[in-house]
Amino acid sequence: MPHPLGDSLRTGRGVDLTGVLAGANPPATPSTPPPATPDPPPQRQPTAQQPGTVRLPAGSTATLVRREVTADGTLPVPDGVGEATWWGVDLGAAEGATVLAGHVNWKGATGPFDELWRARVGGEVTVVDTAGKAFRFTVSEVATVRKDDLPRRAVELFGPRGGHRLVLVTCGGRWVGGQLGYEENRVVIATPAG
């Protein structure tokens, strides 16, 4: 049996972004007309901007690494607590989400993303790319989402529509084990400062 401090966000290895891959709308029912326009394709990783580091509101930092969403809709998160996944649009994009996901803990070690459980609206997050350019964001929303609700909310939180936002994700809450690991995800949304 896995140790409660050694697993991760969805299946022990990532964040469930199935809704982003499936589209912005839930399947239509007979009483619901289909959407007028097709949903945009899933976001792709930015190609020009290289990941660097993130400094969270209380000062914790993590090194960023690029990851692609897998065929089953999972965004892989690196093993350990020193690195976090970077996925989505470039940091200076006009719209869409830049997603950073990291473990709350790993094999008994508390990770920097643990501080998301104490994040408050108004906190500052800074992401620096490998070229040394800093992008500052202000926390605008903090939510706790049950893992079984995350796919339904994926497009809202992580999708390509809407103003640009930085979305920070970790796991936590009650440990339930199995494929779920922790029962909840902490989602912190920050918008460009200034």
Image (cartoon, rainbow, N blue to C red):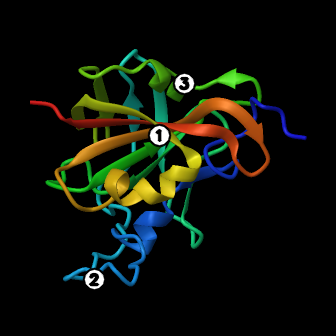
Q: Is residue 96 visible?
A: yes
Q: How far apart, in angstroms, are the residues tagged by discs 1 and 2?
A: 33 Å
Residue in the picture at 64% in, 39% down = 183
Residue occupied by mark 3: 114
Tell whether 157 sits left or right of 83: left
Q: Is residue 85 left or right of residue 13?
A: left
* Secondary structure of the residue carrying numbered label 1: strand
The first of marks 3 and 2 along the sequence is 2
Q: Are marks 1 and 2 in contact (CB under 8 Å)?
A: no
Percent x, y for residue 58?
40, 15
* Residue beneath the point at 63% across and 49% down: 10
Q: Position of residue 18 (x, y in %)?
A: 50, 65
| Badge 1 density bin: few <14, some 14–19, many ≥20, Cα 10 Å | many
Q: Residue at x 66, y 36 (%)?
A: 80
Q: Please tell me whether residue 97 is drawn above or below residue 28 in the rendered image.
A: above
Name the residue type under label 3: Asp
